Structure formats: structure tokens, C-alpha cells
């Protein structure tokens, strides 16, 4: 066939194209100018009338806090997701004991507050450990710190929520595509690695995006068990200086920026494989 | 004249779904170069029969031989059979190019990726070689320009042609078509039949389950009429369509005209 195909619209269906972005001229429409002026006034008021003299002194600690927050987010999301894949898979295809175990785990973790899980781990397990022989184990230097309990609690929580998401994603991959893979002689492992898992992840990406943003905003809970993340640094600022609103506004801005970066990164991943319609 | 080698031999195949016996002892031999069309009403067991050949459906009893190699089966403990050697089934499946009613292209891959997937990741071919073969096949089914598009953006006819290219890419001994045009809009049926017809003309071995009687008559050298899980009648297209003997076949043919 040599017929002329129209310009290829398929590969860019969901991507943001240059023509979707506002042009320089479009900023000068009256309603935009008004909104820009209001925003500028707001920023001016915040900078001029509020107290920011404490900021330079705390900048290094804030930077450290952001790093800890991001480390918490990425380590627990990645570990949690690695656990979520088998949790979702056995609920779709596993033998019933595993299925029951996985769905029980997801139900219990999703049914209790994360703060409670964190405290049970830290104050519960963390206080039992010293009474056992574990003090002499090579793990002790880590187990007497607080961050492993934070990582554990956040990981378990993410795994449980994403286990449910992946269960739905695995179940939602059309049976015909898996059948085609079998019909072409794929082994179970190849089928899982090449077809089922990537297809399920692609289906789950929009949900995972939202869940990762939620996970970011669950990280400040670790401040309650003495992990110094960005939230804990801001709390320290408030304690030291008795200033309330300015540090909290800055904290909100930091979380918003991190969220924005996450959303854009996930959008990029989603757009790598365009989906049609809906 | 020596007879061409046997490509597929199915012997006394039974298939039971619970209390319902869908296939009641079907035997069929396809020699190399044969184009066999299986026709019959819905529920006659034709799709089930085709799917038993590559073990997508496990037969209750009977045997399947592909290129002289019989698939080893054992009792599954529920009155049916299961393959005793999964590796053997996987290996033999790579000799059967299956085309499905609903295309079943992998939606997370481009058309080209779909076509090279099995050659690269199952047959272990080098990727550049697989791409070269795939591009030639896509050109042949008229989809070269669409090689980087995702299946969801193609029409049904284009998807089915891509699926045929995917099946051809494994250089199968036999092509199996499971109602390849049944899910298509009427105006898209022709483009797919043209491709299949071309394959038939170059003497590719094919077993074809279809509702397109005129097409079956034109391309097949052997027609099998299935009714209620048994082969009611079989023979050359002219015998089957021109001179049907059994009452059921007469009724079936008159019902579709």
C-alpha cells in the first residue's frame, strides 16, 4: 500500500504539544493581567510584611530535611512497589492460602491509620528489640536508630495500597493478550516480564501517580518518631523563633514544588505510551 | 508423486466443558501446503477444535501431532488431559502462527514491537535481524507506515493485518486463523481476506475457521463441516458447496445464502 498517510497523530495523542502551551501574547489578555497582578501583590505582601530573617540561618538544615523527605519518599515508594507487585499478582492468580494472606495483609494495613502502624513499630517493636539478643547482632546499630522504623511503616503502607492497585491492574489486562502470548510459546516468566507486568504498570500509572503524591504527604509522620525530615526542621524553626505562619507557608510551598515535580515526571512516563480516548 | 509431509494430525479429539461435550471425536490431518477451512454453525465446536491444536484449550481425550511430534499428555485428575511437558508445548507452539478473532495485539507495544516480540524474546533471534524481517512483513500487509503506531490507533482491519504479520514473523509451519474477520466492520473484511488469500496462494499451510463461505470456497482446498462436535461432512470446496450430501450441510448452506 502506497497511499499517503495523514500526518501521524498516533504517537503524540496525549502529549502536550507546543500549540497547547500558552504563547507569549496570550499572557496579555485582560483577565490574565489581573490575575498576574493579584499574584504579584500577594507575593510582595508575603515577602515584605512577613518575617523571613530566620531563613538564611536554617537554609542548610532545610536542605538536609528536603533530602531526608525525598529519601523517605523514594525508598519507601520503590520498596513498597516491589512488594506490591507480588501482593497484587497472588491475589489474581495465586493459590488460595497466598491469596488469603495477601488480601488479609492489604485489608489490615489499609484499615488502620498509618500513624498507629508507625508508633506500633517504633514504640512496640522498637522497645521489644533491646530486651532480646538483638543488641549483640550486627543489625543493632540500625535498629536503635529511628529511621528504619519510618521506612518500614511507610513501605508496608505503600505496599498495601499499591497491592490493591496492582491487583486491579493485573486483573484488568485483557485475557486475549495473555492468551496470544501463550499461543506464541512464551514461558510463564517471559509472559509475565514482557506482557503482563508492563501492561499492568501502564494501566496503573495514573493511579500510582496520585498514590505517590499521597505518600509524599504521609512522610511528615516520621517526624513524630524523631526522624528529621523537612517537616521536623520547620517545627524546629517554630520552636526556636516562635514564628508560626512563615515557616508553615514555606513548608507548603516546598511540598507543592515536590508534588509538581512528581506529577510532571509521571505524566512523562504515561505519555511514553499514548492511550486512546477517555 | 510423493505425498507432502504431514504438518498437523489430530486424532479422535474429544472436549468436554462440564456436562457439555463440545467435540465428540474429531480427526483431521493437514499436509504441507493444505488450506483447510472449517465451517459450521455457532456452537458447532470449530473454534474449540482450533484452540485444542495449540493447547489453548486442553482436550479431554485424543492426540495432537505437529510435524510428526505428538504432544505428550497425561491425566489431569479431573477426567481430562494436560500436557506432561510444558517445554514441549511451548516449543511446538512457536511453529503455529495463531490469528485471533479479536486481534489480541499487545497494546503497550508499537506495531513493530509486536511483530518482533516473539522472534526476539522467545526464539532468541538478533534484534536487527528480527526488525528487518518484521519491516518486510509489515510492508507486505501494507502497514509499514504504521510500524511505530500503537495498536489502539489502528482500525480493526489494520490491527488484524498487523496480527497476521506477527504470526508470520515466527515463520510458522502452520497458520491458524480463528474467525479472523468476525470482529470487523463489513467494509474492513476485504482487506484482511486479501492478505489471507495471498498467503493461501503461495501454498502456506493454513487451518482457517471462518464464516466467510465465498472466501472459504475460493482459497481452501479442503472444507470441513463441523456440526454438534463431529465432522458431518468434508471434501473439496466443489463437493461441499456444489453437491452437499448430508441434510445438515444442505440446511447450513441454504441458511447462509
Image: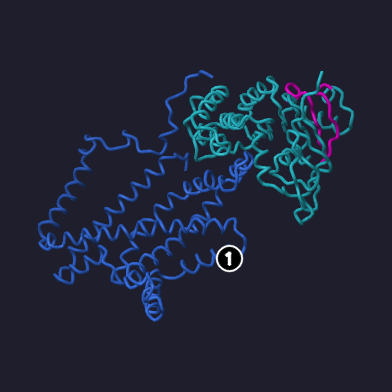
User: Does residue B228 appear anywhere in the picture?
Assistant: no
Q: Quadrant of residue A252?
A: bottom left
Residue A46 % position (x, y):
14, 57
Lateral position of residue A139 relative to residue B67, left or right? left
Residue drawn at 69 percent across, 19 percent down = B201
Residue B226 % position (x, y):
81, 36
- In magenta, the rendered stretch is B216-238
**Vertical comparison of B52 with B139: above or below:** below
Residue furthest to the bottom in view is A131
- Provide the residue designation for mark 1: A100
The crowding category of the residue bearing disc 1, from other C-alpha atoms within 10 Å (few below 14, some 14 to 19, many at least 20), is some
Lateral position of residue B74 relative to residue A196, left or right? right
**Vertical comparison of B96 with A192: above or below:** above
Asked if residue A94 lies in the magenta stretch, the reply is: no
* Of residues B81 and B255, the one drawn nearer to the viewer in this rendering: B81
Residue B228 % position (x, y):
82, 41
**Vertical comparison of A96 with A129: above or below:** above
Q: Chain of mark 1?
A: A
Q: Secondary structure at mark 1?
A: helix
Residue drawn at 47 percent across, 49 percent down = A201
Residue drawn at 79 percent across, 42 percent down = B63
Asked if residue B228 lies in the magenta stretch, the reply is: yes
* Of residues A83 and A20, the one drawn nearer to the viewer in this rendering: A83
Residue B217 % position (x, y):
76, 23
Lateral position of residue A232 relative to residue A92, left or right? left
The quadrant of the rendering that contains the C terminus of chain B is top right
Lateral position of residue B97 relative to residue B253, left or right? left
* Of residues A35 and A92, the one drawn nearer to the viewer in this rendering: A92
* Of residues A171 and B253, the one drawn nearer to the viewer in this rendering: A171
Specify the colour of chain A.
Answer: blue
Residue drawn at 75 percent across, 29 percent down = B37
Q: Which chain is cyan?
A: B
Amino acid at each position: 500500500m502506497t497511499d499517503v498517510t495523514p500526518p501521524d497523530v498516533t504517537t503524540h495523542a496525549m502529549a502536550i504539544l507546543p500549540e497547547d502551551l500558552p504563547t507569549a501574547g496570550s499572557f496579555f489578555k485582560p483577565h490574565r493581567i489581573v490575575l498576574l497582578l493579584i499574584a504579584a501583590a500577594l507575593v510582595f505582601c508575603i515577602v515584605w510584611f512577613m518575617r523571613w530573617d530566620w531563613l538564611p540561618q536554617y537554609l542548610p538544615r532545610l536542605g538536609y530535611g528536603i533530602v531526608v523527605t525525598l529519601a523517605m519518599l523514594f525508598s519507601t515508594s520503590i520498596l513498597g512497589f516491589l512488594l506490591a507487585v507480588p501482593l497484587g499478582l497472588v491475589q489474581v492468580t495465586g493459590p488460595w492460602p497466598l491469596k488469603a494472606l495477601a488480601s488479609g495483609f492489604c485489608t489490615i494495613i489499609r484499615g488502620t491509620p498509618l500513624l498507629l502502624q508507625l508508633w506500633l513499630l517504633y514504640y512496640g517493636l522498637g522497645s521489644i528489640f533491646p530486651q532480646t539478643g538483638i543488641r549483640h547482632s550486627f543489625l543493632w546499630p540500625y535498629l536503635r536508630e529511628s529511621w528504619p522504623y519510618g521506612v518500614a511503616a511507610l513501605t508496608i503502607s505503600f505496599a498495601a495500597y499499591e497491592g490493591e492497585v496492582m491487583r486491579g491492574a493485573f486483573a484488568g489486562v485483557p485475557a486475549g493478550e495473555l492468551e496470544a502470548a501463550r499461543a506464541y510459546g512464551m514461558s510463564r516468566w517471559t509472559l509475565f516480564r514482557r506482557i503482563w507486568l508492563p501492561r499492568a504498570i501502564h494501566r496503573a500509572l495514573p493511579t500510582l501517580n496520585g498514590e505517590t503524591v499521597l505518600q509524599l504527604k504521609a512522610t511528615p509522620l516520621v517526624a513524630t518518631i524523631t526522624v528529621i525530615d523537612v517537616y521536623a526542621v520547620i517545627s524546629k524553626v517554630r520552636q526556636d523563633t516562635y514564628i508560626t505562619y512563615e515557616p508553615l507557608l514555606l513548608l507548603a510551598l516546598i511540598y507543592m514544588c515536590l508534588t509538581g515535580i512528581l506529577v510532571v515526571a509521571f505524566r512523562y512516563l504515561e505519555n511514553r505510551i499514548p492511550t486512546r480516548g477517555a | 508423486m510423493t505425498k507432502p509431509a504431514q504438518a498437523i494430525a489430530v486424532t479422535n479429539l474429544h472436549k468436554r466443558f462440564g456436562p457439555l461435550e463440545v467435540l465428540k471425536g474429531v480427526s483431521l490431518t493437514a499436509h504441507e501446503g493444505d488450506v483447510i477451512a472449517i465451517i459450521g454453525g455457532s456452537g458447532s465446536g470449530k473454534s474449540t477444535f482450533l484452540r485444542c491444536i495449540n493447547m489453548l484449550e486442553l482436550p479431554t481425550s485424543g492426540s495432537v501431532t505437529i510435524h510428526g511430534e505428538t504432544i505428550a499428555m497425561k491425566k489431569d485428575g479431573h477426567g481430562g488431559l494436560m500436557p506432561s511437558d510444558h517445554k514441549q508445548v511451548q516449543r511446538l507452539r512457536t511453529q503455529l502462527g495463531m490469528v485471533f478473532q479479536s486481534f489480541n495485539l499487545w497494546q503497550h507495544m508499537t506495531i513493530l514491537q509486536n511483530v518482533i516480540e516473539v522472534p526476539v524474546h522467545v526464539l532468541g533471534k538478533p534484534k536487527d535481524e528480527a526488525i528487518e524481517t518484521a519491516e518486510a512483513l509489515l510492508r507486505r500487509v501494507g502497514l509499514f507506515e504504521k510500524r511505530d503506531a500503537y495498536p489502539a490507533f489502528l482500525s480493526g482491519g489494520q490491527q488484524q493485518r498487523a496480527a497476521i504479520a506477527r504470526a508470520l514473523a515466527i515463520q510458522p509451519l502452520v497458520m491458524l486463523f480463528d474467525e479472523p474477520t468476525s470482529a470487523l466492520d463489513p467494509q474492513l473484511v476485504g482487506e484482511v481476506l486479501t492478505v489471507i488469500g495471498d498467503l493461501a496462494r503461495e501454498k502456506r499451510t493454513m487451518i482457517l475457521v471462518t464464516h466467510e463461505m465465498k472466501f472459504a470456497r475460493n482459497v481452501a482446498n479442503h472444507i470441513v463441516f463441523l456440526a454438534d462436535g463431529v465432522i458431518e461432512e468434508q471434501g473439496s470446496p466443489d463437493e461441499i458447496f456444489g453437491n452437499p450430501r448430508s441434510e445438515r450441510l444442505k440446511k447450513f448452506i441454504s441458511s447462509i445464502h
